[in-house]
Image: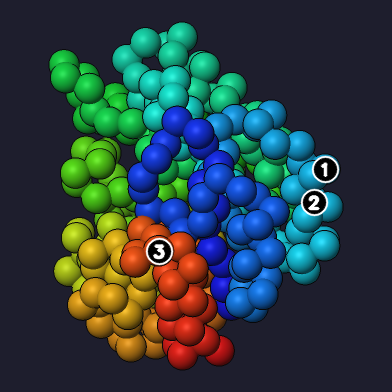
């Protein structure tokens, strides 16, 4: 398993569950000094940062790029894969396609979280799921063509009314036309939705391709009430070998949150 920490690089966003903010090189330098294996980037668009610059910094600081987020497509542009307007769905696919290409240039998968959208008023739930599957089929193939995976993230009920649990996420992935799409197990979302985090992880097993490492209150692990011993046991049991990435609030500040995260990662997985 590999430790990872998030970096938010979207000027329009001032708060949220990312450990480091705004300064890519300074954040990567700090992550490297603490012993993280990688960083997860949240950028405004695929061309907001040069992939060559990202690769150069990753090499300089001996870091991998764990993943790239696509959420700015919704936050800034209002784009989702389940919008009733087919033109907006097409724009969402185009935005994510560009992020897949950006990620591929630095060896990282793209994550689809908030850009999955919601079941809009007046839209049948199955219709929305069909649009989501259609988008994931298209985007999964584009990711596979570029040699990377695509990560789909079930979110809690307060963020989407589409898919909230890992088991439903697994069923979605089983119905897709390609195998390039993996599941993101976000411990914060799971704490809200799953009857048992550890059993859900065991059930999802090899479908899990990325893990978000945050406590019950979305602060760094160890600052909430998550039963992390049980969760860590399940993660080890399924033979997970990917990134465990801190998508958590920078509490009480970025530096202390990063230190808390790497200490927790080392305690459970080191």
Q: Secondary structure at mark 1?
A: helix
Residue matched to label 1: 52
Q: CA distance from mark 1 to mark 3?
A: 30 Å
Disc 3 residue crowd, few under 14, some 14–19, many 20+, Cα 10 Å? few
Which tag is nearer the camera, tag 1 or tag 3?
A: 3
Q: Nearer the viewer, residue 209 or 104?
A: 104
Number of marks in the rendered image: 3
Seen in the picture, residue 202 relative to 158 is either above or below; the reply is: below
Horizontal placement of 114 versus 162: left or right? right
N-term-proximal mark, 3 vs 2: 2
Residue matched to label 2: 55
N-term-proximal mark, 1 vs 3: 1
Q: Is residue 137 visible?
A: no
Q: Secondary structure at mark 3?
A: loop
Residue matched to label 3: 253
Q: CA distance from mark 3 to mark 2?
A: 27 Å
């Amino acid at each position: 398993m590999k430790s990872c920490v998030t970096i938010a690089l979207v000027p329009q966003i001032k708060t949220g569950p990312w450990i480091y903010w705004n300064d890519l090189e300074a954040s990567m330098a700090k992550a490297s000094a603490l012993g993280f294996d990688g960083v997860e980037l949240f950028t405004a668009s695929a061309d907001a940062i040069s992939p060559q610059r990202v690769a150069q910094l990753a090499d300089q600081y001996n870091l991998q790029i764990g993943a790239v987020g696509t959420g700015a497509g919704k936050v800034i542009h209002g784009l989702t894969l389940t919008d009733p307007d087919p033109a907006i769905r097409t724009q969402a696919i185009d935005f994510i396609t560009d992020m897949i290409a950006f990620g591929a240039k630095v060896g990282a998968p793209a994550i689809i979280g908030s850009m999955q959208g919601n079941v809009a008023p007046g839209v049948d739930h199955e219709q929305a799921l069909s649009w989501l599957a259609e988008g994931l089929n298209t985007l999964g193939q584009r990711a596979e063509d570029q040699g990377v995976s695509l990560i789909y993230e079930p979110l809690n009920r307060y963020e989407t009314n589409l898919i909230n649990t890992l088991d439903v996420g697994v069923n979605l992935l089983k119905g897709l036309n390609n195998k390039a799409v993996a599941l993101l197990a976000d411990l914060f979302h799971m704490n809200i939705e799953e009857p048992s985090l550890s059993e859900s992880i065991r059930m999802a097993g090899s479908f899990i391709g990325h893990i978000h490492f945050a406590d019950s209150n979305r602060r760094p692990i160890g600052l909430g009430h998550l039963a992390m011993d049980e969760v860590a046991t399940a993660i080890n049991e399924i033979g997970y070998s990917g990134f465990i990435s801190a998508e958590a609030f920078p509490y009480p500040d970025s530096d202390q949150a990063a230190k808390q995260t790497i200490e927790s990662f080392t305690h459970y997985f080191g």
